[in-house]
Amino acid sequence: MSESRLKPGVVTGEAYKTLINAAKSGGYALPAVNVTGTNTINAVMEAAAKAESDIIIQLSNSGGQFYAGRGIADGFKAKVLGSVAAAHHVHLLAEHYGICVAMHTDHANRALIPWIEALLDEGEKYYEQYGKPLYSSHMLDLSADPIDFNLSESARILERMTKIDMSLEIELGVTGGEEDGIGSDFEEAADNSKLYTQPEDVLLAYELLNPIGHFSVAASFGNVHGVYKPGNVKLRPEILKNSQALVQRTHSTADNPLHLVFHGGSGSEKTKIHEAVTYGVFKMNIDTDTQFAFSKPVGKFVKENARAFEFQIDPDDGTPYKKLYDPRGYLRVGEEGIVTRLQEACEDLGSKGKSIANG
Ligand SMILES: [Zn+2]
């Protein structure tokens, strides 16, 4: 392998670029898993360590809020504090799992620009102190707005992020389905041409953003958030190929000049996932499938130990249930569910055994 190896832990700036380039040249993509607290974060890092894969840990605005706790009355403040706390948690622990972790935030629409700017305030403070940002990358999803606004606002934010070695993910075209209240209604989106990114828009984005800094593109090729009945989703990964080709042809770049992101990876056909990776997808977002992977074994645990969730001591025979109602018991089986599910994701994406962290 020709690419350089990295120190385990959170990777930002040049190291994040190295990670992306290793994935693209190695023909694999990294799972970007949405998390909501320490259990899900630790499970994702444990899964990556077990798969010997690097990984992307991602927080939505409501994931950040949940991390801070529903008890904080000021919801906006909680979204910021929770996202900062989660990043601190990963900065402290990731290296001990022996893999590289990129920290990312998920969809921020127009209304959530203040959340991103508040996180950049924190990122700048962190950078001043430690010489690296809190997050490797943020996502700005202004795909519901006119393309001019989407691109000019993305450029404005990227100017600021570049100064602290951060990368920006933008969205062109609308990903169907809904994630944490953001996104378009699936039924409505299904017959909407906006569901498919126009390669001309990708070229515009490249020409504006590439001179400013490092960015990635969530392009819509029929992908949908969530899991729907088979047949409802028609993935057209050739849109990614056409976008790459247009930029490459126009600017005489190397192969696959764009860094592409696959949203709505849950429930997708494996062959389409593989095809998308060959077109330069380095990151696939996973949320729905790992939520279910956590919850299913918890449900089984509760069902199998129903008495322990009703009585501290069994009223019939005096059996003490402390070991079973201790939240660590069922939270651990949820964590294990995520660890198992992500082994499959790493295999699907080809990242298994490919960690570039110094062993
Ligand atoms: Zn998404």
Image (cartoon, rainbow, N blue to C red):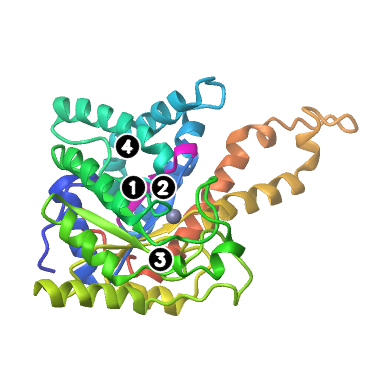
Q: Which amino acid does label 3 sit on?
A: Ser
Task: Tell me if I can see residue 359 in this picture.
Answer: no
Image quarter in which the N terminus is found: bottom left
Tag shown at residue 220: 3
Q: Is residue 234 magenta?
A: no
Mark 4 crowd level (few <14, some 14–19, many ≥20, 10 Å Cα): some
Q: What residue type is labelled 2?
A: His
* Tag 2–tag 1 contact (CB < 8 Å): yes
Q: Residue at image x 32%, y 51%?
A: 150
Query: Measured from the top left, where is residue 104 in percent x and y?
Result: 33, 45
**Ligand number 1: quarter of image:** bottom left
Label 3: element kind: loop
Mark 2 Cβ inside 8 Å of ligand 1: yes
* Tag 1–tag 3 contact (CB < 8 Å): no
Mark 1 Cβ inside 8 Å of ligand 1: yes
**Disc 2 designates what residue?**
107
Tag shown at residue 139: 1
Mark 3 Cβ inside 8 Å of ligand 1: no
Q: Distance between the residues labelled 1 and 4?
A: 23 Å
User: Considering only order in the chain, which callout, 4 or 1, is on the residue closer to the N terminus?
Assistant: 4
**Disc 4 designates what residue?**
93
The image quarter containing residue 146 is: bottom left
* Tag 4–tag 3 contact (CB < 8 Å): no
Q: How far apart are marks 4 and 2 (CA)?
A: 25 Å
